[in-house]
Image (tube, rainbow, N blue to C red):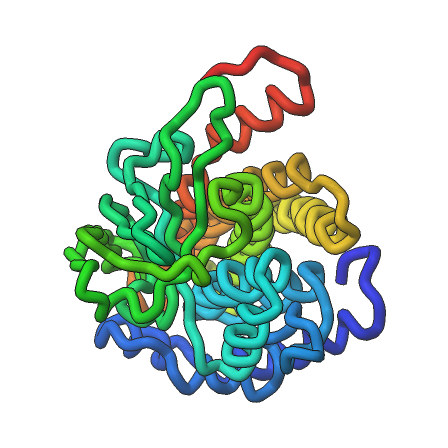
Amino acid sequence: MAAFETEMHGMIREATREIAAKYDAEYWRECVNEKEFPEEYWQDLADNGWLGVAIPEAYGGEGMGMLEMAIVIEELSRGGGQGGIIFVLTPVFGGIGIERHGTEEQKEQYLPKIANGEMRFCMGLTEPRAGTNTLNIDTHAERDGDEFVLEGQKTFISGVENADEMLLIARTAEFDRSNPTHGVSMFLVPDPAEQAGISLTPIETTVPWFEIQYQVDIDGLRVHEDRILGAEDGGLYLLFDTLNTERIGGAASALGGGLRAIDLAVDYAKDRDVFGQPIGAHQAIQHPLAEHYAKLTAAQQLTYDAAAKWDDGDDCGMEANAAKLLTSEFATEAASQAIQTHGGNGFTPEYEVYDLWQNARLTQTAPVSNEMAKNFIAEHHLGLPRSY
């Protein structure tokens, strides 16, 4: 437990650990191999209230905050499989975004369904030409009466094939250098994989669970104005607010994965007997694991500082970016050391640690590259000149 945690937080950890323990490596391996969404796991989380952890009680949630959500994500990731990763998509992109910026009608329509597991979200943001430069997106929406007609392309979109809604980012006004943040809007698009104006093209990767991403081509997609989240043309700052929570959730997921790698390495080092004693008795095995564990626990505190500041309505940009940066790097290091601890076994599916390394390494690039996190810290907190 981190220094700030209360007895309630300890109970959250214990409860989510119990759920994660019910779904072993074979369950997750089957979901990945068969490319199936983990329906049973998802509904278990919903039935126990965790999908609605940060949704107000008035809309069927638990009425907690980002801090509690981060604890849930960490423990689900530490429990194994892909639980922490898939948790980030819907409660963050859907639940927190709508609770924070939606109309009352939108909250009533979406939040109860997110909390009970009925609705899943994905996000359509990344584009081939724009990359991390959101101001440079090409996807645009032209008003036609009380509807918008959207055209464009998104790439490396996760979970769209299983999503009931997509939070789709598009330009609703031309880019203006004198007011560059104006003109971006967020649209709530239902059933994105089934829409007549959307076509999906698979993009293969080598990362478990994210093995199949999608290119999303948008051609004549019609969306009613009631499905704008927040203000027309004013969605960029709302998007940044959502992305801070994504970075906190991503940090918690990386943190849990890194701690799981340490857990598995420690268990293996205790049991693996070579030259008459467990390999964990040797400092060459002990010291790297101790160092990586210390780094992860330090990053844990920063992650929850970011979540607590977000809950208090304070600017958490520094903490969110730093937590994302450090957890991704420390988790990758920890998983790499876990592979080394396992020797040749570390490269087999049975021992899981190589999958953990792939997941951790991905977090250095997504949801935002570590270079962009460093740029933010350098410019906004060190006062260095803007470099991009």
Q: Quadrant of the image for the C terminus? A: top left
Q: Nearer the viewer, residue 212 or 291?
A: 212
Farthest residue toward the front?
145
Say left or right for 193 vs 209. Answer: left
Farthest residue toward the top?
385
Residue 259 visible in the snapshot: no
When asked about the image quadrant of residue 284, the answer is top right
Q: Quadrant of the image for the N terminus? A: bottom right
Q: Nearer the viewer, residue 241 or 188?
A: 188
Q: Is residue 247 above or below residue 376?
A: below
Say left or right for 221 vs 248. Answer: left
Rendering coords of residue 161 (x, y %): 27, 68
Rendering coords of residue 28 (x, y %): 36, 75
Rendering coords of residue 300 (x, y %): 67, 51
Q: Nearer the viewer, residue 134 or 367?
A: 134
Rendering coords of residue 63 (x, y %): 72, 73
Q: Is residue 182 above or below residue 105?
A: above
Count of labels in the image:
0
Q: What residue appears at the point 46 percent right and 56 percent down from the top-left corner?
A: 228
Q: What residue appears at the point 72 percent right and 40 percent down from the top-left corner?
A: 315
Say left or right for 318 vs 45. Answer: right
Residue 239 visible in the snapshot: yes
Q: Is residue 351 above or below residue 240?
A: below
Q: What residue appears at the point 49 percent right and 18 percent down from the top-left corner?
A: 178
Q: What residue appears at the point 70 percent right and 47 percent down from the top-left corner?
A: 306
Q: Nearer the viewer, residue 198 or 114?
A: 198
